[in-house]
Amino acid sequence: MIVGIIVAAGKSERMGADIDKAFLSLGTKPVLAYSLLAFEKCPLIDGVILVVRKDRLDSARGLVQMFGCSKVRKVIAGGASRQASVMNGLAELGDDVKIVAIHDGARPCVTPAVIEATILSAKRTGSGVAAVKVTDTVKSVDRGTMVSATVDRAKLWTVQTPQTFRTDWLMKAYGQTGKKKLTVTDDASAVEAVGEPVHLVPAPGTNIKITTPGDLALAAMILKV
C-alpha cells in the first residue's frame, strides 16, 4: 500500500501574522485543495493522511468533502514544527503501508505525474525526492554581502516535495531524530542521517512553494486560475 502524507500545519510567518496559507484562496479553490486533488488523481496513491493545524481540523474535513477527495483516510492535527507534523502522520500508518510520499500542502502546483515519478523511484531504490538542478550561478557569502567564493553549480540541486521513501526507512529515520533530538528541515535530511541513500527525481521548476504573497500570484499563473 502507498500512502501520501500532506502536511499543512505551518504558521505561515512570512505571509503575515495569523495567516494560514493552506486555506488562502488561489483562483476558485483554497491552496491546499490543489495538492489534495493531485494526490486524488495519482493512480499509485491508495490513501492520504492530511495534517493541519489543530484549529483547522473542521475546515480541513469540510474541504475534503467539498472537493470529493475520497482517498483521504484521516485528518489529524500537526505539531509545533513540520518535523513534528510528519511524525504525527507517520504514527497513523498501518503495517500494510510500504511506501510513503510526504508533500507540503503549500506546493499547489504539484502534478500527479511528479508524485508518480517519486513513487516509482522509491519502488526501485527506496527513495525518490522531487528536485530541480540549479542553473543560476551561486555565490557563497561568509559575512554581510561580500562574496567569498563561487560555488560549483554542477553539483547543486534544490529539493521540493513530494519526498517519497520506503516506510521502514522513514520510521527508522524519524525514530532516530526523536531519540537524538535532531532538527531536520526535510524528510531527506532525516533519511540521510541514518545512512540510507537518497535519490533525486528531476521535477519542473513550476512546483513552487507558497511562502510570500507574490508566490500566490505566480502559482495562479502556473495553474492558469
Image: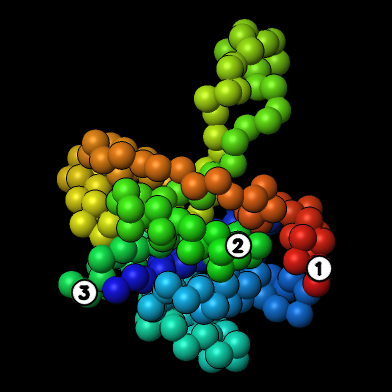
Label 1 crowd (10 A; few <14 / some 14-19 / many >=20): few
* Residue placed under numbered mark 3 in the picture: 96
Report helix, strand or loop for mark 3: loop
Looking at this view, name the residue that lies furthest to the front: 124
Q: Position of residue 58 (x, y in %)?
A: 49, 86
> Image quadrant of residue 209?
bottom right
Query: Which one is earlier in the sequence, the residue at label 2 or at label 3?
Result: 3
Identity of the residue drawn at 57% across and 72% down? 38
Q: Position of residue 172 (x, y in %)?
A: 20, 51
Residue 211 in view (yes/no): no
Label 3 crowd (10 A; few <14 / some 14-19 / many >=20): few
Label 2 crowd (10 A; few <14 / some 14-19 / many >=20): many
**Labelled pair 2, 1 in contact (Cβ < 8 Å):** no
* Residue placed under numbered mark 1 in the picture: 224
Q: Nearer the viewer, residue 30 or 128?
A: 128
* Left or right side of 11 for 54: left
Quadrant in the picture for the N terminus = bottom left
Q: Nearer the viewer, residue 170 or 182?
A: 170
* Residue placed under numbered mark 2 in the picture: 110
Amino acid at the residue labelled 3: Asp
Query: Which one is earlier in the sequence, the residue at label 2 or at label 1?
Result: 2
